[in-house]
Image: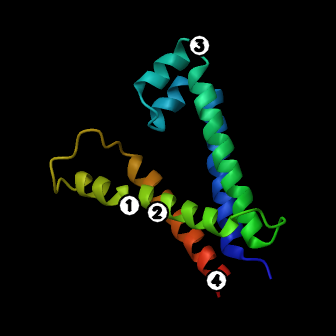
């Protein structure tokens, strides 16, 4: 039986990869919206290749992570170290998602961290947290 959690996790990683392709195509406006930084946005506006190359590497990484999740799910053949890669993926997504705590506390003015928190940041963190937990649950199912 296929590990549905890892299939869902793979879909999430592929979605994130496609989202980064959209950022490359859309350019500076998308780099700003998704928080890549003003330097990336300006470089994209100036027609420099660095933002597109760096973002393409990110697309490749998320695509590979998706393929590894499919490997763990039994959809594609077993790849080397797939259990370790899935665990690592789950941990990284979860750690990124834990930024939600800081962002929500800033939004509620619990601390003086309001600067630099954009309205969309908690949503990005929530998606990361969910993907991390999905990967970790899928990894746990591999062990049972």
- Dot 1 surroundings within 10 Å: few (below 14), some, or many (20 or more)? some
Say the numbered circle drawn on residue 143: 4
Q: Position of residue 88 (x, y in %)?
A: 55, 62
Q: Which residue is mark 3?
A: 47
Q: Mark 2 and 3 residues: CB-CB less than 8 Å, in contact?
A: no
Give me the C-alpha separation between circle 1 and circle 3. Answer: 34 Å
Where is 50 relative to 98, above or below?
above
Say the numbered circle drawn on residue 94: 2
- Which mark is first along the chain, 3 or 4? 3
Q: Mark 1 and 2 residues: CB-CB less than 8 Å, in contact?
A: yes
Give me the C-alpha separation between circle 4 and circle 1. Answer: 25 Å
Seen from the viewer's position, the closer of residues 1 and 112 is 1
Q: In the visual, does 27 lie left or right of 98?
A: right
Question: Could you say whether the residue bearing mark 3 is in a helix, strand or loop?
Answer: loop
In front of the other: label 2 or label 3? 2
Question: Could you say whether the residue bearing mark 2 is in a helix, strand or loop?
Answer: helix
Q: Which residue is mark 1?
A: 98
Q: In the visual, does 70 lie left or right of 85?
A: right
In front of the other: label 4 or label 2? 4
Q: Position of residue 62 (x, y in %)?
A: 64, 49
Q: Name the residue: 39% across, 53% down.
A: 122
Q: Quadrant of residue 38?
A: top left
Give me the C-alpha separation between circle 2 and circle 3. Answer: 34 Å
Which residue is at the far bottom? 144
Q: Name the residue: 64% across, 36% down.
A: 57
In front of the other: label 4 or label 3? 4
- Dot 4 surroundings within 10 Å: few (below 14), some, or many (20 or more)? few
Q: Position of residue 11 (x, y in %)?
A: 69, 59
Question: Could you say whether the residue bearing mark 1 is in a helix, strand or loop?
Answer: loop
């Amino acid at each position: 039986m296929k590990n549905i959690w890892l299939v869902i996790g793979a879909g999430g990683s592929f979605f994130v990869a496609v989202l980064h392709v959209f950022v490359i195509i859309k350019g500076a406006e998308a780099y700003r919206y998704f928080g890549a930084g003003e330097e990336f946005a300006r470089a994209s506006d100036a027609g420099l290749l660095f933002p597109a190359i760096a973002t393409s590497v990110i697309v490749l990484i998320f695509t590979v992570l998706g393929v590894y999740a499919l490997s763990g799910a039994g959809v594609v053949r077993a790849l080397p170290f797939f259990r370790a890669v899935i665990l690592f993926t789950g941990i990284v997504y979860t750690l990124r998602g834990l930024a939600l705590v800081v962002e929500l506390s800033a939004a509620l003015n619990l601390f003086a961290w309001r600067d630099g928190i954009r309205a969309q940041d908690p949503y990005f963190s929530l998606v990361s947290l969910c993907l991390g937990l999905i990967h970790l649950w899928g990894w746990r199912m591999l062990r049972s």
